[in-house]
Image (spheres, rainbow, N blue to C red):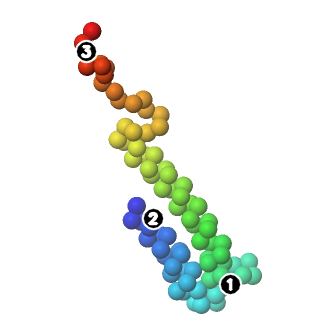
Amino acid sequence: MLVLLSIWFVVSYLLGIVFVETLNQFYLGGIPLGFWFAQQGAIFVFIILTFVYAFAMDRIDRRHGVDDNSAPRLPKDISGTAE
């Protein structure tokens, strides 16, 4: 998950704030690239990061047996008395 946090940092802070003047020398569809990253690109990346995170968490849940599709693991006799 450190990778996802690093991508978030690079896109939001470095590309959207620190390197915006350098990126503004290039254009994407007639819009300066730094402005595009700050206004649109970051939103697209954050949505993709959200889906990647949800997929990764589902995979970890399945691996540990706590996913939404598995039945709860209760003891066969939860009343404490034997039949």
Q: Is residue 37 visible?
A: yes
Q: How far, Cα to Cα, is label 3 from label 2?
A: 49 Å
Q: Residues within 10 Å of mark 3 (few under 14, many from 20)?
A: few
**Percent coordinates x, y for residue 27 in the rendering:** 69, 83
User: Does residue 53 lie above or below 9 as drawn?
Assistant: above
Residue at screen point 27% across, 9% down: 83
Q: Quadrant of residue 71?
A: top left
User: Does residue 55 lie above or below 31 as drawn?
Assistant: above
Disc nearest the viewer among 1 and 3: 3
Q: Is residue 27 left or right of residue 70?
A: right
Q: Is residue 21 left or right of residue 6?
A: right
Q: Amino acid at mark 1?
A: Pro
| Residue at the spot of label 3 | 81
Residue at screen point 53% across, 74% down: 11
Q: Amino acid at mark 2?
A: Leu
Disc nearest the viewer among 1 and 2: 2
**Percent coordinates x, y for residue 66 in the rendering:** 39, 39
**Percent coordinates x, y for residue 30 in the rendering:** 75, 82
Q: Along the polypeptide, which appears first: circle 1 or circle 2?
A: 2
Q: Along the polypeptide, which appears first: circle 3 or circle 2?
A: 2
Q: Amino acid at mark 3?
A: Thr
Q: Which mark is residue 32?
A: 1
Q: How far, Cα to Cα, is label 1 from label 3?
A: 73 Å
Q: Is residue 45 left or right of residue 71?
A: right
Disc nearest the viewer among 3 and 2: 3
| Residue at the spot of label 2 | 4
Circle 3 sits in a helix, a strand or a loop, which is it?
loop
Cβ–Cβ below 8 Å for labels 1 and 2? no
